[in-house]
C-alpha cells in the first residue's frame, strides 16, 4: 500500500484474503478499486472493472497493482468469497474513526430486503432475497453498520450481531416491533445505550398492560404536541410519556426488561382535504424506553427520527445506487456489495459543501478525479 493511500484503506488491510497465497491481485487493491468505482457510479462488477481500466493511471498513485487491473470475473469471485462479517467489521471500525454522533444521538435499527437478490446458488439449493439490518445515525445521516439475516432466520437474530459492531455509549437505540425483545434490550443497556422499542401485538401482555396504563387518565404524564400542515393535509402528533411507579406497578413481567423505566404513546391524527372532501384517520403506537430522564418532546423527536431511516437510508440507496435492481446473487457478493454502497453513501455525506444529491455526486466523482480525491481525503503528489 502506497504512502499516498487514502485513510479509509487502512481499515481494510487486515481483512482475510479468501484466495490462495499466490493470487495475482492484492486484496486491498481490489477493495479500494471497488470503493472508488462505486463512489464514481459503478453498480456492477462489470462497471467496477471498466472503471479500473479507465482510471488505471490515477489508481496507481496510491495502489500497487502489480498485475494491472483485475478482471470482472476476479472482482466478482473475490466478493463472492469474502467473509461479510470481516468487511462489515472493517466498515464499522472506519465509521467510528471518522464520525462523531451529534444531536439526540438516535441510532435507528431497521431492515430492508434487496428484492432481486433471490435465486443465487447455495449448498442448500437457491438463496432467498438478501435482507439486511442496518444501524443509522439519524442526525448525522450515516450508516453505522449492517448485518445480513441468516437465510433460515430473521431480524431477531441479526440485531444482536449488529449491536456488537456499534459503540452505543450515550445513544438512544430505536427499533420497530421485531426488535422488541428482552435480550436485545439487555444488550443495548450492557453496551452503554438506552432503548426505545416499539411494542405491538407480538408482546401480548406487555402491549395490553401499556394500553391500560395510558387509558387511566388519573396517572400523570408528560405531553408534547406537534402539528404539520401542507398540501391539504394536517398531521397532528401527540406524545405521552409515563415514568416511575406507574410503570413498575402496572406492567407485568417488568423484570424481563432490563432498565425499563418509561412507557410512551404516540397518537397520529391525519386530516386530508381533497376536492371538497375531508377524511380523518387516527393511529396510536406504543413504546418502552429505558431513558431515566425522558421528556415527551425528546421522545417525540426520537420516534420521528427513527422513521427517517426509510427516506434517508433505504430510499436513497435504492434511488441513488439502484440497489433493488441489482441482480448480484452469488455467494457472499450481495452482502459485500451492499457494504460498498453504504461506504460510498457515507463518504459522499461527509462532503458538507456539496449542493447536489447523492446520485449527482456519484456522477461528478465519475467525471472528476479531483472530486473523487476530495471525497477520499487524498492529497496526491
Image (spheres, grey):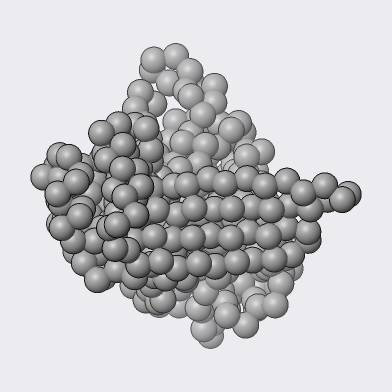
Residue 370 position, x and y percent, is: 65, 78
From what the image shows, is residue 290 above or below residue 257?
below
314, above or below 151, in the image: below
Q: Residue furthest front?
A: 218
Q: Residue furthest left?
A: 255
Q: Is residue 33 visible?
A: no
- Number of numbered discs on residues: 0
Q: Quadrant of the N terminus?
A: bottom left
Nearer-the-camera pick, 351 or 196: 196
Task: Where is residue 342? Give x, y as percent.
Answer: 50, 56
Give the percent coordinates (x, y) of residue 197: 33, 50
On the image, the x and y values in percent for residue 159 come to: 31, 44
Whether residue 381 is visible: yes
Q: In this orientation, which residue lies closer to the viewer: 11 or 184?
A: 184
Residue drawn at point x = 72 percent, y = 58 percent: 233
Indicate the quadrant where residue 230 lies.
bottom right
Would residue 286 appear left or right of 342 to someone viewing this image?
left
Determine the image quadrant of residue 52. Answer: bottom right
Q: Residue furthest right?
A: 275
Along the viewing direction, whichever of 205 and 158 lies nearer the viewer: 205
Q: Using the image as rendered, state which of residue 111 and residue 94 is in the foreground.
A: 111
Specify the quadrant of the image occupied by residue 351: bottom right
Which residue is found at the position 15% from the left and 58% from the top?
Answer: 245
Residue drawn at 77 percent across, 49 percent down: 278
Q: Which residue is drawn at the image coordinates 31% and 50% (left, top)?
A: 216
Amino acid at each position: 500500500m502506497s504512502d499516498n493511500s487514502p485513510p479509509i484503506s487502512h481499515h481494510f488491510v487486515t481483512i482475510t484474503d479468501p484466495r490462495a497465497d499466490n493470487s495475482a491481485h492484492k486484496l486491498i487493491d481490489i477493495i479500494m478499486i471497488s470503493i472508488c468505482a462505486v463512489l464514481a457510479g459503478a453498480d456492477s462488477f462489470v462497471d467496477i472493472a471498466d472503471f479500473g481500466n479507465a482510471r488505471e493511471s490515477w489508481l496507481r498513485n496510491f495502489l500497487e497493482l502489480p498485475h494491472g487491473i483485475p478482471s470482472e470475473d476476479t472482482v466478482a469471485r473475490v466478493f463472492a468469497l469474502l467473509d461479510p462479517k470481516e468487511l462489515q467489521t472493517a466498515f464499522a471500525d472506519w465509521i467510528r474513526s471518522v464520525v462523531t454522533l451529534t444531536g439526540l444521538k438516535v441510532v435507528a435499527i431497521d431492515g430492508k430486503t434487496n428484492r432481486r437478490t433471490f435465486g443465487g446458488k447455495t449448498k442448500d439449493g437457491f438463496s432467498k432475497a438478501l435482507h439486511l439490518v442496518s444501524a443509522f445515525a439519524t442526525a448525522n445521516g450515516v450508516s453505522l453498520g449492517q448485518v445480513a439475516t441468516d437465510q433460515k432466520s430473521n431480524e431477531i437474530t441479526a440485531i444482536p450481531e449488529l449491536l456488537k459492531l456499534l459503540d452505543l455509549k450515550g445513544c438512544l437505540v430505536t427499533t420497530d416491533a421485531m426488535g422488541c425483545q428482552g435480550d436485545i434490550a439487555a444488550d443495548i443497556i450492557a453496551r452503554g445505550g438506552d432503548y426505545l422499542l416499539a411494542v405491538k401485538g407480538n408482546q401480548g401482555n406487555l402491549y395490553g398492560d401499556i394500553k391500560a396504563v395510558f387509558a387511566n387518565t388519573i396517572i400523570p404524564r408528560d405531553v408534547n404536541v406537534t402539528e404539520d400542515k401542507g398540501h391539504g393535509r394536517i398531521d397532528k402528533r401527540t406524545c405521552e410519556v409515563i415514568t416511575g411507579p406507574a410503570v413498575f406497578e402496572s406492567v407485568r413481567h417488568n423484570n424481563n426488561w432490563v432498565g425499563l423505566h418509561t412507557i410512551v404513546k404516540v397518537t397520529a391524527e391525519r386530516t386530508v382535504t381533497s376536492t371538497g372532501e375531508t377524511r380523518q384517520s387516527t393511529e396510536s403506537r406504543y413504546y418502552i424506553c429505558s431513558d431515566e430522564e425522558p421528556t415527551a418532546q425528546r421522545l417525540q423527536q426520537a420516534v420521528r427520527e427513527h422513521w427517517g431511516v426509510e427516506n434517508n437510508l433505504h430510499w436513497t440507496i435504492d434511488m441513488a445506487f439502484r440497489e433493488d435492481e441489482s441482480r448480484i446473487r452469488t455467494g457472499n457478493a450481495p452482502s459485500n456489495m451492499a457494504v460498498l454502497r453504504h461506504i460510498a453513501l457515507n463518504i459522499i455525506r461527509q462532503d458538507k459543501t456539496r449542493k447536489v444529491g447523492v446520485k449527482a455526486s456519484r456522477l461528478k466523482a465519475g467525471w472528476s478525479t479531483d472530486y473523487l480525491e476530495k471525497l477520499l481525503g487524498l492529497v496526491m503528489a
